[in-house]
Image (cartoon, helix red, strand yellow):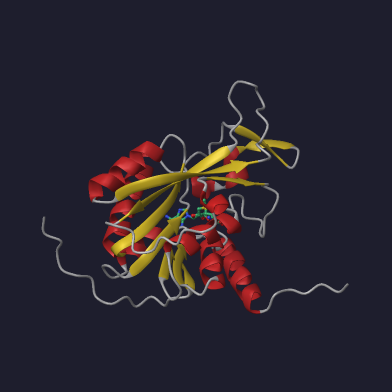
Amino acid sequence: MSRGPRRPRSVLEVNRVHLMDALEGLKALPDESVDLVITDPPYNIAKKGNKTILKGKRISTMEAWGAWDHYHPYDYDAMMMRVIGECWRILKPRGALYMFTAPQDNGVFVRHAVARGFTFRSQVAMVKKTALPSIFRSAWRSAFEVAFYATKGAAKSFNFLEQAEMVNVYHYPTNHKHTAHPTEKPQELIERFVRVSSKPGDLILDPFMGSGTTAVAAKKHGRRFIGFERSPDYLAMAEKRLKELDHPATTAE
Ligand SMILES: C[S@@+](CC[C@H](N)C(=O)[O-])C[C@H]1O[C@@H](n2cnc3c(N)ncnc32)[C@H](O)[C@@H]1O
């Protein structure tokens, strides 16, 4: 299959989160320029009619997560298939991809990634200690999310950590958050992906950066990063977190 002309060098600055659509940002990245992708895309599960409880109040999942998590199913599938294809293009040979997914999409996205050429390696489950209550008692309470891990050929970085850190089930209390982003991922888990699947100086991409967890994890461990986020409010959260790494807040005792 012809790969078409190589994309020219990117004009996008690294070590920055750009206020951009994920696909537009991805398209601006050159072929084989990124060492590792870690991403937590919208799950497309927010709906006006579905209810959840947040801070003791019964609200729609659309209000709880935000309109950013709502796509027409056809548009969502089309976007995610293109995102996976672009991740394949911009990853260096033997680079790696970690992608969180909604339960109904995990198998579909893995199969699509494999069809693009990725090698499926494993899944990592993130178990929440404080699952949201089931309002109508008509469904199982959701207490875990899953990311899949795939590589472009044999993994070029796989730094095996302590045995306990390499178990593919991660437990965390959901109240350990750094920002008001409704779906902030646990920084410790993202740091683990960074430590295992990259080395200092590598370039790490997150096309759906949210509050900047991937960028913070990359910067903290001496990796470079680049990312995209469509919401100015979430971008501001990411920038604040990144600044705080340079000047950590101190508390008077
Ligand atoms: C699940 S959240 C990511 C949360 C992130 N992992 C964190 O720890 O904060 C997905 C993010 O993607 C953003 N988003 C949704 N559609 C997008 C698009 N087409 N391009 C760029 N960002 C988008 C949303 O605003 C949201 O912040």
* Residue furthest to the front: 163
Residue under the image location 76 percent in, 38 percent down: 56
x, y (%) of residue 21?
A: 41, 60
* Residue furthest to the top: 138
Q: Is residue 133 above or below residue 238?
A: above
Which quadrant holds the N terminus? Answer: bottom left
How many numbered discs?
A: 0
Q: Nearer the viewer, residue 170 or 178?
A: 170
Residue under the image location 14 percent in, 64 percent down: 4
Q: Is residue 210 above or below residue 18?
A: above
Which quadrant holds the C terminus? Answer: bottom right
Residue under the image location 42 percent in, 64 percent down: 205
x, y (%) of residue 102?
A: 47, 40
- Indicate left or right for 24 with 2 as reference: right
Query: For residue 232, what is the image quadrant?
Result: bottom right
- Indicate left or right for 177 with 87 as reference: right
Q: Is residue 215 above or below residue 153?
A: below
Query: For residue 86, what is the image quadrant?
Result: bottom left
Q: Is residue 20 visible?
A: no
Q: Nearer the viewer, residue 125 or 86?
A: 125
- Indicate left or right for 72 with 68 as reference: left
x, y (%) of residue 199?
A: 43, 70
* Residue furthest to the right: 253
Q: Is residue 27 visible?
A: yes
Q: Is residue 28 above or below residue 56?
A: below
Residue under the image location 43 percent in, 34 percent down: 104
